[in-house]
Amino acid sequence: MSAKTKFLESSGKFFHIYNRGVNGSPIFIEERNYDYFPQKLWLYLGQSAVKLIAYCLTPNHFHLLVKQEVPLRYRSLLEMRATDMRRR
């Protein structure tokens, strides 16, 4: 078991998650994108053991502060995302 897997399988930890557009390009193009992102975020987090503490959306990046409530397997997050992509 890798150190990363051990860390994810613990509980009560906080994570700062962030991402930005390629070469700093915008990821939120239209005003409605700022509404869509949190809707999807709540959908995913509602199916997981992660609690959203805070988030910040800017035109070219976002920040999330989440707390892992119970041990979580990284694979389950990937499976959840893959399931959503198949539904489209």
Image (cartoon, grey):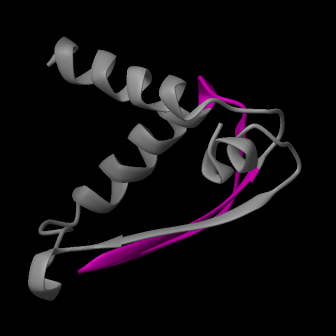
Q: Which residues are magenta?
A: 46-67
Q: Position of residue 74 (x, y in %)?
A: 55, 35
Q: Position of residue 10 (x, y in %)?
A: 83, 42
The answer to whether residue 56 is above or below residue 68 is: below
Q: Residue at x 24, y 57 (%)?
A: 33
Tell me the quadrant of the picture where the C terminus can be found: top left
Residue 9 forms part of the magenta stretch: no
Please give the count of numbered marks on the rendered protein. Answer: 0
User: Would residue 31 appear left or right of 53 to someone viewing this image?
Assistant: left
* Residue 82: quadrant of the picture: top left
Q: Residue at x 12, y 69 (%)?
A: 29
The answer to whether residue 75 is above or below residue 14 is: above
Q: Residue at x 35, y 29 (%)?
A: 81
Tell me the quadrant of the picture where the N terminus can be found: top right
Furthest residue toward front: 1
The foreground one among 3 and 11 is 3
Q: Residue at x 16, y 86 (%)?
A: 24
Q: Position of residue 18 (x, y in %)?
A: 45, 70
Residue 49 forms part of the magenta stretch: yes
The answer to whether residue 44 is above or below residue 66 is: above
Q: Position of residue 31 (x, y in %)?
A: 22, 66
The answer to whether residue 21 is above or below residue 67 is: below
User: Would residue 84 appear left or right of 14 to someone viewing this image?
Assistant: left
